[in-house]
Amino acid sequence: MIRLQNIEKVYRTDTIETLALNSISLDVAKGEFLSIMGPSGCGKSTLLNIMGLLDTPSKGDIRISDQKTDHLSDKQLAQFRNQKLGFIFQSYHLINDLQVLDNVELPLLYRNTTAKERKELATEALAKVGLSNRIKHFPTQLSGGQRQRVAIARAIVGRPEIILADEPTGNLDSAMGNEIMDILINLNRNEGTTIVMVTHDENMAHKTHRLVRLFDGSQVQ
Amino acid sequence: MLKNYFKIAIAVLRRRKFFTFISLFGISLTLTVLMVLAAFIEKVTNPVYPGDKNSRSLYIKRLTYTSKKGWINSGGSSFYFLTHYAGSLKTRVKMAIVSSNTSSNAYVNNKKIVIDMKYTNADLWNIANYQFIEGKPFTPDQINKADRVAVISERTRNEYFGDAVTVVGKYIEADNISYRITGVIKNVPEIEEVFYANMFLPYTVAKSDYRNKDFWGDYSAILLAPSEQLVTKMHTEYEQMVTRIPIPDNMKKDFDTLHSDADTYFETFTRGFFGNADNAGYARFLLFMSLFVLLFMLLPTVNLVNVNITRIMERSSEIGVRKAFGASSKTLVYQFITENIILTILGGIIGVILTIIILQVINSSGFIPDLDLTINPVVLLYSLLACLFFGLLSGVYPAWRMSRLNVVTALKAQ
């Protein structure tokens, strides 16, 4: 589903060159739930951003659903992300000015969907994460766990093949974290969604199919 | 999509109320000033009452002598000059000759009343469409006989005799002379200098001798062409005739050229402020007004650009999320410009409401008596278009900057 070959990411300033990712090669199979672990600053999030086409590698090749992505224009990249990928962030990144329903509808705005379809799909996604009774609330009126569930609903509303989650339980207590993890596991099992998750939590990582460890930008496991 | 943009635009406006206030204040105040100014200019330069034949009329006001040494001497025209020269034009059908106003004080029940008097010939009543509340104008016969007759304004009637009193046939005293009233007209605003007076009298009763053969005097003329199409011909005929007028002997020593122009009503103003004896100042007026409007609108635009850039930084997380979930840079530019247009249109609507209120206040304040300023629909349309244009202008640069934000950097900014 996702194939990374010899991915390198170098950050350059006038005086210094930092190697954030060093020759990473990784295959993620369709329907797999993969977790990435490693100490802070080892390049986990950078790797996830590259997989999500939010960032570009300095070197190497990325294929998603057997499609090369390095030649895509800004518009094509946007379309590709919209159709294939869903994102979950540690700090949720909900738009506080919009109600829960409008937040969840967001990915559908960039597709040819009617307002009615958007509402139906968003309501359905919110039902899957158990937030049907909060659609008119604003994000600031919700708890951390509820906000992350809204973020999951937003990630799945467009029915993407891949979900990329960057420390989705990082800001939550263990009970809330487990709840979120259960939603992701069910999503993977029931819908067959491929999930790549960056985490610091060994317990969460062990619930996934496979664990990849990074250290100083290199894959060590 | 638009509904979503609208929701977010309103939410952003509500989020930072002070910024919103500054932006809306800038836009609406600018538009208000421009629309009030436009209403004023329109009223001054296009008198609907009583000058309803303006499109067929030309005005002769100033008479100027110039010399090659650079000397300029300017004044009004004499009754003799106007009748003798302008009166000989073949194209015109009528010519009203009116003096500038002289003020006279009258006392009624120990209360001082100021009466602005104007001397005129009979054609004023044919060229200008004064509305008579009672009575009628004085006749050519009364003028020829130098009868002491007067047409007064409604305001003077009310102040001198009291409201709603029939006054035709009664006498009114000004400068210790009694005049018999033949008619009462609806008030004319003071800013319509050529048409305005509280009391109109036959030129034959004026203290200054209208037969004096000096070219300089206290009079202006309104020439009426047979049709709108013949106005240009009448203008050319007058222009050519003026070149043939001999300079009076007493002026020959100091001056070598005589200038007198037949201007449109609008040009009488532009010549006064932006022109000279040779130039009606129309082009300069347009240039000045364009620059004024541009600079005046540029201020809120620059302010908006600034405010918008500041707001972008607050919204970088939203930009990152939108990009991550499929918004292209172009879509984001479109969204941000739409939001900005919503803001400027909101400012425009407030501006229109403010203008209506301010015009109402000016009209009812009596600051300029009998002035009835209204919003011109064309000016309103242009103002809203300008609003839209500057909304676009102030949104494009911030939108472009916003769309170029890197997704990862934008997401980290929160």
Image (cartoon, rainbow, N blue to C red):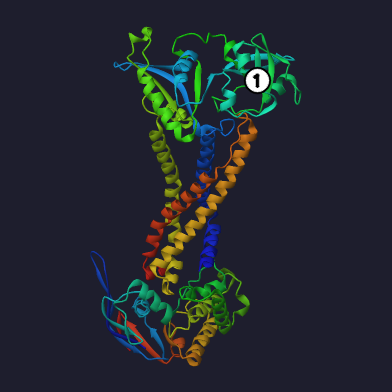
For label 1, count other residues whose C-alpha is less than 10 Å away and answer few (under 14), some (14-19) or many (20+): many
Figure quadrant of residue B150: top right
Q: Residue at x 61, y 72 (%)?
A: A136
Which residue type carries mark 1?
Answer: Val
Which residue corresponds to the image point at 59% horizontal and 47% vertical from the top-left?
B353
Give the position of the C terminus of chain B as an image quadrant.
bottom left
Give coordinates of residue B345: x percent, y percent: 52, 54
Q: Is residue B34 visible?
A: yes
Q: Mark 1 — residue?
A: B151
Q: Quadrant of residue A3?
A: bottom left
- Of residues A95 and B184, the one nearer the viewer is B184
Element type at marker 1?
A: strand
Q: Position of residue B193 (x, y in %)?
A: 54, 25
The answer to whether residue B265 is above or below residue B257 is: below
Extreme residue toward the left, this view: A15
Query: Is residue A154 left or right of B110 when viewed as pictured?
Result: left
